[in-house]
């Protein structure tokens, strides 16, 4: 009951706070980088539904990879995590539905769980429905779990080498770093950047969502050398932080992507004033290089591709990787490790590799 | 040999009991049949008597396709149908797992164009069909509309799952079919 009241109060506060938010539209953004090299990604293999030993993979929704190239996949229809070795052979599965420690609250799309290996080597499973973070070791043994505050928000777990967890605070509009005892260690204010939009102001539905949760369009990741990347999806901007200090602010506005986005969003808004789309919807760091990261654009209609922009924390666009659009299928890339790109497509884990010239 | 009155009486009673038992059994059987046919689905052990279907490429399927030496998986769905949509992911995985050893029939209770569009947008990996005579098919299979059905058939109905299934049940179905191959 108390928790519900707190949640309601925080939502109201967030909404009130949100309504006063200053929306800024960057009407004519100038490209900050230019696409030089387009590299095709070829499908190498995929993980079949039948994993052997009466184990089946139905709907993978999240995955992560550890230092030893073991892959962990969360099946949303079974509330199970499957662990595969580097050759994609099933090693074990763990996790189940329940209300007890280390158990997931349900199956199906309303019970989303996002998993990620923290920089401390442990496996973190964010049970979004119940606001619970479950921590396993790499053998799938339960270590601990904790519930986070209703005003803290995170989708993909971000955890540093000391085991500190990074959250956005809906209430304070900060990024809070909490230690194992949930004590706030640092708090970084997120800039006005969060409410900047490219070309057009989105419709009321989107703005109401942002008012309820100002950090919904913000995501984070930690590079191998512990630099924090804060990605503001609406303005396609990345802040690079090192020891709490902003060391770089990168506007990811590649010429062609910007042009394609402008056309697409104006078409969408012409269809309906509430349609909204981001230029890049996903950020993930390169697990092979300590300064590289990837941004996935939904689509580039001009070339008919699903593109992945490879950049470095210095603000350079290194190359653009792509696969052909094959609608209604869509590949969502999740991890890059050992020169392999792991994506989810048609409820399957699919692995891609750069085409060699 | 002359039988006593006592023996006659005993035989008459015994016969009456047998006749009564026979009649009761017959009545039970009739009631059971009536009850079964009033159920909105086929039950385990029943046979399918009408299986005339048309595929998207106009191929015709009939009863003989059920009598082959391999198990048959039948997925029945209609549009719109939320449990059917939720089952799709399991059906696709079953079709993937059993593509070599099992005949898979997706049956949509609708028009052929609807089946075609649905197959395209849902990227189905199994063939879908529409009944030649939808009313007859619905009557014979005792289907209630908006009802998703997953049926395992091998000579007769081996398993029926109505409505939305969960991961555990899907694993159970896969194991059952594997046991039949």
Image (spheres, coloured by chain):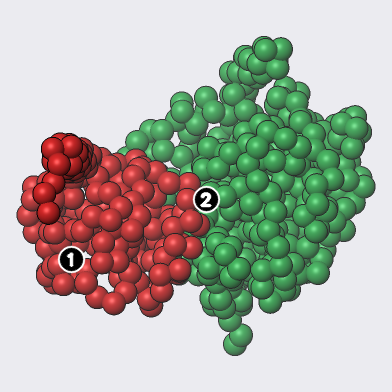
Chain colours: A green, B red
Circle 2 marks a residue in which chain?
A: B
Mark 1 surroundings: few (<14), some (14-19) or many (≥20) residues within 10 A:
some
1 vs 2, front mark: 2
Give the Cα separation between the discs numbered 1 and 2: 32 Å
Residue at x-position 72% and y-position 46%: A125
Q: Name the disc covering residue B56, or none.
A: 1
Residue at x-position 80% and y-position 38%: A145
Residue at x-position 56% and y-position 76%: A45
Residue B110 in picture, x, y percent from top left: 16, 50
Residue B52 in picture, x, y percent from top left: 11, 63
A54 or A304: nearer the viewer: A54
Q: Can residue B166 be seen in this view?
A: yes
The residue pinned by badge 2 equals B168
Most extreme residue toward the bottom, as rendered? A357
Q: Are tags 1 and 2 found on a single chain?
A: yes
Residue A329 in picture, x, y percent from top left: 42, 60
In the rendered view, tell whether residue A204 sits above or below residue A73. Answer: above
In the rendered view, tell whether residue A324 sits above or below residue A248. Answer: below
The quadrant the C terminus of chain B occupies is: bottom left
In the rendered view, tell whether residue B88 sits above or below residue B94. Answer: above
Residue at x-position 63% and y-position 41%: A97
Q: In this view, does A294 lie to the left or right of B171?
A: right
Q: Is residue A274 left or right of residue B29?
A: right
In the rendered view, tell whether residue A32 sits above or below residue A244. Answer: below
Q: How many labels does the image show?
A: 2
Q: Name the disc covering residue A111, or none.
A: none
The quadrant the N terminus of chain B occupies is: bottom left
Which structural element holds mark 2?
helix
């Amino acid at each position: 009951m108390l928790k519900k009241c707190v949640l309601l109060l925080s939502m109201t506060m967030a909404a009130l706070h949100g309504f006063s938010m200053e929306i800024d539209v960057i009407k004519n953004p100038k490209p900050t980088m230019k696409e030089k090299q387009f590299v095709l990604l070829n499908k190498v293999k995929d993980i079949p539904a039948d994993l052997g030993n009466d184990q089946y993979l139905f709907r993978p929704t999240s995955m992560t990879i550890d230092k030893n190239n073991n892959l962990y996949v969360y099946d949303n229809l079974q509330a199970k995590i499957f662990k595969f070795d580097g050759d994609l052979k099933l090693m074990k599965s763990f996790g189940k539905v329940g209300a007890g420690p280390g158990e997931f609250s349900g199956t199906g799309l309303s019970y989303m769980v996002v998993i990620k290996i923290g920089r401390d080597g442990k496996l973190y499973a964010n049970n979004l429905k119940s606001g619970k973070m479950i921590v396993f070791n790499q053998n799938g043994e339960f270590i601990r779990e904790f519930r986070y505050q209703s005003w803290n928000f995170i989708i993909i777990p971000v955890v540093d080498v000391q085991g500190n967890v990074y959250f956005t605070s809906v209430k304070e509009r900060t990024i809070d770093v909490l230690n194992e005892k949930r004590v706030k260690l640092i708090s970084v204010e997120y800039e006005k950047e969060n409410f900047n939009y490219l070309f057009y102001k989105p419709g009321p539905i989107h703005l109401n969502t942002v008012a309820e949760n100002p950090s919904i369009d913000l995501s984070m990741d930690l590079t191998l050398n512990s630099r924090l990347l804060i990605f503001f999806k609406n303005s396609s901007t990345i802040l690079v932080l090192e020891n709490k200090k902003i060391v770089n602010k990168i506007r990811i506005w590649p010429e062609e992507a910007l042009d394609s986005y402008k056309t697409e969003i104006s078409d969408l808004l012409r269809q309906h004033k509430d349609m909204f789309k981001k230029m890049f919807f996903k950020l993930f760091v390169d697990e092979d290089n300590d300064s590289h990261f990837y941004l996935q654009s939904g689509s580039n209609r001009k070339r008919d591709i699903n593109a992945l922009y490879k950049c470095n924390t210095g603000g350079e666009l290194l190359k653009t990787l792509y696969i052909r659009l094959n609608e209604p299928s869509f590949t969502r890339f999740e991890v890059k490790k050992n020169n392999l790109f792991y994506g989810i497509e048609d409820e399957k884990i699919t692995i891609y590799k750069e085409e060699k010239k | 040999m002359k039988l006593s009155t006592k023996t006659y009486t005993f035989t008459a009673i015994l016969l009456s009991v047998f006749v009564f038992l026979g009649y009761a059994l017959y009545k039970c059987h009739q009631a059971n049949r009536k009850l079964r046919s009033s159920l909105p689905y086929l039950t385990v052990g029943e046979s399918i008597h009408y299986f005339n279907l048309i595929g998207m490429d106009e191929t015709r399927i009939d009863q003989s396709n059920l009598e082959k030496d391999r198990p048959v998986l039948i997925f029945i769905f209609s549009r719109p149908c939320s449990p059917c949509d939720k089952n799709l992911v399991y059906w696709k995985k079953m079709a993937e797992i059993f593509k070599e050893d099992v005949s898979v029939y997706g049956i949509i209770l609708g028009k052929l164009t609807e089946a075609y569009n649905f197959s395209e947008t849902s990227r189905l990996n199994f063939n879908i069909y529409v009944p030649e005579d939808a009313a007859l098919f619905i009557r014979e299979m005792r289907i209630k509309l908006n009802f998703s059905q997953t049926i395992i058939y091998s000579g007769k109905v081996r398993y029926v799952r109505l409505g939305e299934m969960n991961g555990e049940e899907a694993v159970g179905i896969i194991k059952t079919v594997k046991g039949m191959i």
